[in-house]
Image (cartoon, coloured by chain):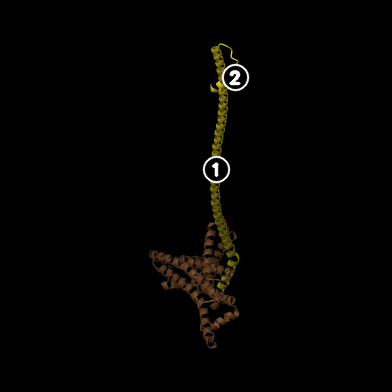
Chain colours: A yellow, B brown
Amino acid sequence: MGINITLFGQMITFTVFILFTMKFVWPPIKQAMSEREKRIQDGLASAERASHELELAKEQGAAHIREAKSQAAEIIEKANRQGASLVDEAREEARTVAERERVAAEARIEQEVSQARAALRKEVSELAILGASRILEREVDPKAHQQMLDQLTEQV
Amino acid sequence: MAAGGSATDYVQHHLVHASVGEGFWTLHIDTLIVSWVLGLVFLGVFYSVARRASVDAPSGIQTVVEACVEFIDNQTRESFHGPREFVAPLALTIFVWVLLWNLMDLLPVDLFPVLVKMLGFEYVRILPSADMNATFGLSLTVLLLIIIYSIKGKGWGGFGKELIHHPFGSHPLLWPANLMLNIVEMIAKPVSLGMRLFGNLYAAEMIFILIALLPIWAQWVPGVAWAIFHILVIPLQAFIFMVLTVVYLSLAYEEH
């Protein structure tokens, strides 16, 4: 035992080993490790980004659906309104047509009534003249009594 | 236990290095070869992983190596706040190399002595951490690095000023005291580093050798118990050496 030249041999060996480790061992291993670390970090980051995007897409999809639903509801409502207004219009038209018909019919009836009345009057006046001539046993000049006859007709 | 001879002979036999040369020029062949082989195992494994390092599909061995690198990287990042291109590989080298050294303590104490005896050699010690030359080889290199980092971090002037102004004050009368204290502190660092590792592992080896003195049927219980306890000590000592080195370098590099 005791210190001797072996010490210096060990020092030289140690120095060589350190330099070898520093040059050829440490950097490649460290580089591989940090590279892997970076990849893992990137992977995690992109996974996070993807999940974020997924969430966003989901939200967008939901918004689209909501919009579509509201649009559909709007369209249905509009259609309903249109249908109702069509029915209203049709009803209105029918009513005016019926009214017009009624008015025309009434006018026709009026006219017929007045015709009938005129005919009746005429007949009555003729009958009256006939009756009067029978009573008087002679011809009554209708012209002479026209005014009276007219008065009579008016009264009928 | 080797046949023949007293217990003292047996223990002493296990504490002699395979060496060449005389006096200071003695070279502990066993320490050198074992630490080289272990260092080459470390570098070979780590280098082959580093060359084929895959980002997408790390193999099993790559995962283990990366765990080590990650661990060391975290430790150095916590303690050292300068550029770490040198400090982190240094810490990795210390940790793994010392760990492998210490693991040699778990091999049976008689295995290698018997093997080398077959090859015709008398002595061998396969635990580099129980050789002061190995542990001080590390810690003295660390001392040099401490000086280099002090100069790098503070400049020649800053480092010199700190040596004579710190810790008592910048009065010229206090300079000798400051310098003395700083030199003691600077020497204490590698000594404590080297002695701690050496002491722990030397003691542990000694206990394994003493356990090996027991009769063969009685070795199991203390042997297993000590080995299990030692599994804790092995990485702990490697870790302490590594962390203290980084802390010392950080203290040296940063302004007080």
Q: Say which chain tag 2 marks.
A: A
Q: Residues within 10 Å of mark 2 (few under 14, many from 20)?
A: few
Q: Give me the disc on residue A27.
A: none
Residue A35 place in picture, x, y as percent: 58, 60
Please tell me whether mark 2 sits on a helix, a strand or a loop. helix
Looking at the rendered structure, the kind of residue marked 1 is Glu
Residue B92, quarter of the rendered image: bottom right
Most extreme residue toward the bottom is: B173
What residue sits right under mark 1 in the picture?
Answer: A74
Q: Relative to the observer, which residue lies in front, B256 or A69?
A: A69
Q: Select label 1 or label 2 by which is in front.
A: 2
Q: Nearer the viewer, residue B97 or B87?
A: B87
In the image, residue B222 lies at what x, y percent?
39, 66
Q: Report the number of discs.
A: 2
- Residue B71 percent location from the top left of the image: 51, 65
Can you name the residue that lies furthest to the top here? A137
Asked whether residue B161 appears in the rendered view, the answer is: yes
Q: Are marks 1 and 2 in contact (CB under 8 Å)?
A: no
- Residues marked 1 and 2, same chain: yes
Amino acid type shown at disc 2: Gln
Q: What is the spatial separation of the Cα atoms under label 1 and label 2, in whole angstroms? A: 79 Å
- Residue B47 in sight from this viewpoint: no
Chain label for disc 1: A
Q: In the image shown, does B39 or B118 lie closer to the viewer?
A: B39
The residue wearing badge 2 is: A146
> SS of the residue at dot 1?
helix
Residue A64: x, y in percent?
A: 56, 47
Residue ID at (54%, 22%): A155
Q: Is residue B72 above or below residue A79?
A: below
Q: Pick whichever of labels 1 and 2 is earlier in the sequence.
A: 1
Residue shown at the point (56%, 29%) measured from the top left: A103
Pick the residue in front: B209 or A133.
A133
